Image: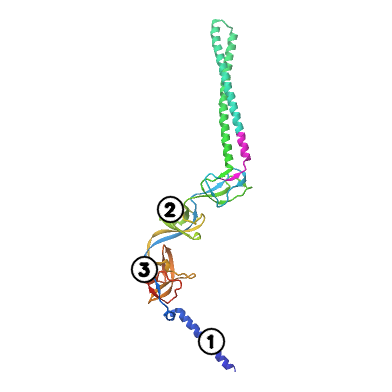
C-alpha cells in the first residue's frame, strides 16, 4: 500500500521541478517568442523613435550649498532692558524703518529729562555770565577813566597820593571782575555744549529701545518674546532683505582656479522642485582649515546678466533650503537619449528599443540629466533605435509602427 503513494509523490515533485526550470529559462530571455506570439494578433502601435548617438555633453562637478537672501540682518539689543513688546512674527513682511520690537525705556526717558534740565540750567548760567560781563565791562571802563584822570591830577599835585591809589585799586578790581565774568561765559558755553551732547546721548539710548528694520524684507526668525531680558549683542530678530537669492557653496580647494566671477552654474533645489541658472558673483579666497573648502556665492536667475527677463528670482525658493550646484568643466563625448524615453520602475530605469517591428524593454543605467536629455552609462549601444515617448500601456514585445 505504501509503494503507490511514493510513486505519486515522486511524480508531483518532477512536475514542479520541470515547471520551475521552465520559468527560469523564460527569465533568462526566452520569453520574446512567447510574447511575440501573444501580441501578434494586436494592432501595431504607432510610435516615434530616435537613434541613440554619442555627442558632446557638458562635463560638470557638483557641490552642495544653502540658499541665502540678498542680505540677512540679525537685529540685536544695544542696552540692558526688558522687552516690552514684539510687533512681528516669523514670515511677516516689513518695510525699512518699521518698529519691530520695543524695549523698556523708563531709565532712558529719565536720563533724557535730566539732560534737558541740565541744558536749561546751562542756558540760564550762560545768560547770567554774559550779563555779568556787560556789567563788569562798564565798571572797568568807568574805573579806567577815573584812573587816567587821577594820573593827570596827581602829576599836577591836585590830589593826594591816597586818592590816586584808591582809583588805581578800583581800576584793577573792575578789570579782574571783567576777566572773571568772561571766563564764566566760556564755562557757560562749555556747559551748554556738554548738556546738548548729553541730550544727544540720551536720545540715542532712547532710540535703542526701538528695534527697527534696516531694510524692506521679511522676518525669517523671531528669537524672543515679550518679558525677556535683553542684553547688548543679544539676537532678537532675523530679517532677510527682499531681492535676488543666492546660494553659498563650499567648493573643494582643487577647483580654486576654475571658478572665476561670471561663471554660469546650474542650481537644483529638490525640496522646492526648482531648477535655475545662476552666475558666480563672489569667490571668497580664504579657505576653511577644517574642510579645505572655499566659499562661492552663486546668484540665482542672473545667468543672462542683470536686467534680463531671466534675472528674476525663481519662485518657491526660500532662504535656508539645501541646493546642489553644478559648475561646468568643459565638454566630453557621451551617449544620450531624450528624457521622455525613460520609463522608471521603482529603483530601475527602463526604455524601449525598436527592433524587427516590435518594442523591446531594456534596463539601463543613467547618468546626469541636462536639459531634455539624459546620459546612458550602460544597457544601450550607439545606433540603436529608441522610442522617444513610449505609450503608458506599452509592453515588452508589442508590435509597433514607426511614425514618419
Q: Could you tell whether 189 is left or right of 258 in the image?
A: right
Residue 182 among those drawn in magenta: no
Q: Residue at the location (60% across, 26% down)?
A: 125
The quarter of the rendered structure image containing the C terminus is bottom left
Contact (Cβ within 8 Å) of mark 2 with mark 1: no
Q: Which of marks 1 and 3 precedes in the sequence?
A: 1
Quadrant of the rendered image containing residue 175: top right
Q: Could you tell whether 70 is left or right of 50 in the image?
A: right
Crowd tier of the residue under label 1, counting other residues whose Cα lies within 10 Å: few below 14, some 14–19, many 20 or above: few
Identify whether 60 is placed above or below 122: below
Residue 198, position in %: x, y? 58, 34
Residue 351, position in %: x, y? 43, 71
Q: Which of marks 1 and 2 precedes in the sequence?
A: 1
Residue 102: image tag? none
**What is the C-alpha distance between the residues marked 3 and 2?**
34 Å
The quarter of the rendered structure image containing the N terminus is bottom right
Location of mark 3 (residue): 53
Quadrant of the rendered image containing residue 189: top right
Location of mark 1 (residue): 13
Between disc 2 and disc 1, the foreground one is: 2
Q: Secondary structure at mark 1?
A: helix
User: Which residue is more in the foreground, 103 or 60?
Assistant: 103
Q: Residue furthest front?
A: 43
Q: Secondary structure at mark 2?
A: helix
**What is the C-alpha distance between the residues marked 3 and 1?**
51 Å
Between disc 3 and disc 1, the foreground one is: 3
Q: Secondary structure at mark 3?
A: strand
Crowd tier of the residue under label 3, counting other residues whose Cα lies within 10 Å: few below 14, some 14–19, many 20 or above: some
Find the magenta span and give its range: 99-115
Location of mark 2 (residue): 311
Amino acid at each position: 500500500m505504501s509503494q503507490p503513494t511514493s510513486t505519486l509523490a515522486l511524480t508531483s515533485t518532477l512536475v514542479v521541478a520541470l515547471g520551475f526550470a521552465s520559468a527560469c529559462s523564460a527569465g533568462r530571455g526566452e520569453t520574446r517568442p512567447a510574447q511575440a506570439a501573444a501580441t501578434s494578433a494586436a494592432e501595431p502601435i504607432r510610435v516615434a523613435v530616435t537613434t541613440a548617438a554619442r555627442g558632446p555633453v557638458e562635463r560638470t562637478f557638483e557641490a552642495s550649498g544653502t540658499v541665502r537672501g540678498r542680505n540677512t540682518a540679525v537685529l540685536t539689543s544695544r542696552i540692558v532692558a526688558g522687552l516690552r513688546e514684539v510687533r512681528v512674527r516669523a514670515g511677516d513682511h516689513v518695510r525699512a524703518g518699521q518698529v519691530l520690537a520695543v524695549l523698556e525705556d523708563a531709565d532712558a526717558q529719565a536720563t533724557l529729562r535730566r539732560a534737558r534740565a541740565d541744558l536749561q540750567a546751562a542756558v540760564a548760567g550762560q545768560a547770567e555770565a554774559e550779563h555779568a560781563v556787560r556789567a563788569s565791562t562798564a565798571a572797568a571802563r568807568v574805573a579806567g577813566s577815573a584812573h587816567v584822570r587821577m594820573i593827570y591830577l596827581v602829576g599836577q599835585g591836585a590830589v593826594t597820593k591816597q586818592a590816586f591809589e584808591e582809583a588805581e585799586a578800583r581800576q584793577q578790581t573792575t578789570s579782574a571782575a571783567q576777566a572773571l565774568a568772561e571766563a564764566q561765559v566760556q564755562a557757560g558755553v562749555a556747559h551748554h555744549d556738554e548738556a546738548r551732547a548729553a541730550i544727544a546721548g540720551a536720545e540715542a539710548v532712547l532710540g535703542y529701545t526701538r528695534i527697527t528694520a534696516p531694510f524692506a524684507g521679511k522676518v525669517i526668525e523671531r528669537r524672543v518674546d515679550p518679558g525677556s531680558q535683553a542684553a547688548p549683542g543679544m539676537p532678537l530678530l532675523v530679517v532677510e532683505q527682499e531681492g535676488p537669492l543666492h546660494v553659498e557653496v563650499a567648493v573643494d580647494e582643487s577647483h580654486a582656479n576654475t571658478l572665476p566671477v561670471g561663471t554660469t552654474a546650474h542650481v537644483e533645489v529638490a525640496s522646492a522642485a526648482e531648477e535655475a541658472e545662476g552666475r558666480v558673483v563672489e569667490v571668497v579666497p580664504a579657505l576653511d582649515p577644517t574642510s579645505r573648502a572655499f566659499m562661492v556665492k552663486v546668484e540665482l536667475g542672473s545667468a543672462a546678466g542683470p536686467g534680463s527677463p531671466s534675472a528674476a528670482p525663481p519662485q518657491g525658493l526660500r532662504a535656508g533650503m539645501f541646493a546642489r550646484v553644478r559648475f561646468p568643466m568643459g565638454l566630453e563625448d557621451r551617449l544620450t537619449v531624450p528624457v521622455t524615453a525613460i520609463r522608471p520602475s521603482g529603483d530601475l530605469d527602463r526604455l524601449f528599443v525598436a527592433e524587427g517591428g516590435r518594442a523591446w524593454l531594456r534596463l539601463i543605467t543613467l547618468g546626469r540629466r541636462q536639459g531634455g536629455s539624459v546620459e546612458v552609462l550602460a544597457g544601450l549601444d550607439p545606433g540603436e533605435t529608441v522610442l522617444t515617448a513610449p505609450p503608458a500601456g506599452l509592453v515588452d514585445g508589442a508590435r509597433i509602427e514607426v511614425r514618419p
